[in-house]
Image: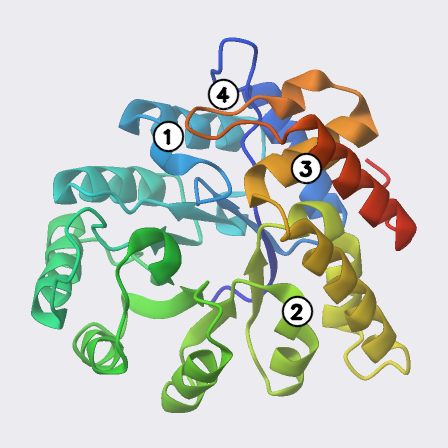
Amino acid sequence: MARGIYAASLTPLDQELNIDYKKLVNHCRWLLNNGCHGIVLMGTTGEANSFSIAERMETLEAVIHEGIPGNKLLVGTGCCALPDTVKLTKHALSHGVGGVLVLPPFYYKHVDDEGLYRVFAQIIQSVSDDGLKIFLYHFPKMSGISFSIPLIRRLARDFPEQIVGLKDSSGDLKNMELMRQTFPDFGIFPGNEKVLLKTLREDGTGCISASINLTCGLAAKIYTGIDHKDAEVWQKELNQYRGTIEKYPMVPALKQVLYHITHDETWLYMRPPLVPLKKEQAENLIEELESIGFQMDY
């Protein structure tokens, strides 16, 4: 079972807005060398749904080819079309990944639990691989689709070897606590590290977060030092950084910070409809982070 600090990796692009595989591999290495236990490729932060199926598969192949261990990776494979999800999932498993993070089909809204159940039952049947480990991706603000407690219970009951966890990016802490209490053996990852210390002290799994792209070292220190006398201080510091970053559109903000640190303007590139921060936003973000002592050795 995947556990620990996972960065929902950014995807660096070149001037033509194609994926810069070399820079992505270097970023993955930096994340793993600076405290991450694993990396999510092609999630929301990685702009997955701005890329074609072929691009997403080529990205995983490039990362694996350059020596990033497959078992350190969770790969986003959820698409609107079921055959695309199946194709990406089969491809990911063929490269020995630790699991797949699967959004529900997100175009049709107000679908009921039966429809969502059939989606995942069909994925499992079509993939037909003993190594399949699915983490449900609960992000209703972005997808417009929620995983209910009864649906999770049914999926976990009927497919206990395949449905093994969930990333909760809902921001609803009460619902996340209910999920953790209802499914104590389920790997539930908060999508926000503000609850990292609390979650770990309650024997939680860890976290999968976008801002871990910048704060992985501090988050890892909390993960390994939950009983340290300074753990609460570290968590407060982590919360300040996250609270500042999330005032702005997340992907542009993270890429802006990396541009500021590296002076490499290609970090500002992203696929439309995402666009860089406006000049005033960018200046304010950097000033706010510097005012609270943010530093990053990249």
Q: Residues within 10 Å of mark 1 (few under 14, many from 20)?
A: some
Please, what is the three-letter code of the amino acid marked with disc 4?
A: Ile
For residue 223, which quarter of the picture? Answer: bottom right
The kind of secondary structure element at disc 1 is helix
The kind of secondary structure element at disc 4 is loop
Direction from residue 117 to residue 296 in the image, left or right: right
Label disc, if present, on residue 29 of the rendered structure: 3
**Which residue corresponds to mark 1?**
50
Which residue is depicted at the point 65% across and 24% down?
A: 267
Q: Residue 201 appears at what percent x and percent y?
A: 67, 85
* Alpha carbons under labels 4 and 3: distance apart: 17 Å
Q: Earlier in the sequence, mark 4 or mark 3?
A: 4
* Alpha carbons under labels 2 and 1: distance apart: 28 Å
Q: Earlier in the sequence, mark 2 or mark 1?
A: 1
**Which residue corresponds to mark 2?**
194
Q: Earlier in the sequence, mark 4 or mark 1?
A: 4
* Alpha carbons under labels 2 and 4: distance apart: 30 Å
Which residue is depicted at the point 90% across and 77% down?
A: 230
Q: Residue 288 appears at what percent x and percent y?
A: 82, 48
Q: Are marks 1 and 3 in contact (CB under 8 Å)?
A: no
Q: Are marks 2 and 3 in contact (CB under 8 Å)?
A: no
**Which residue corresponds to mark 4?**
19
The one of 283 and 270 positioned closer to us in this rendering: 283
Q: Earlier in the sequence, mark 2 or mark 3?
A: 3
The kind of secondary structure element at disc 3 is helix
Q: Residue 117 appears at what percent x and percent y?
A: 13, 67
* Alpha carbons under labels 4 and 1: distance apart: 11 Å
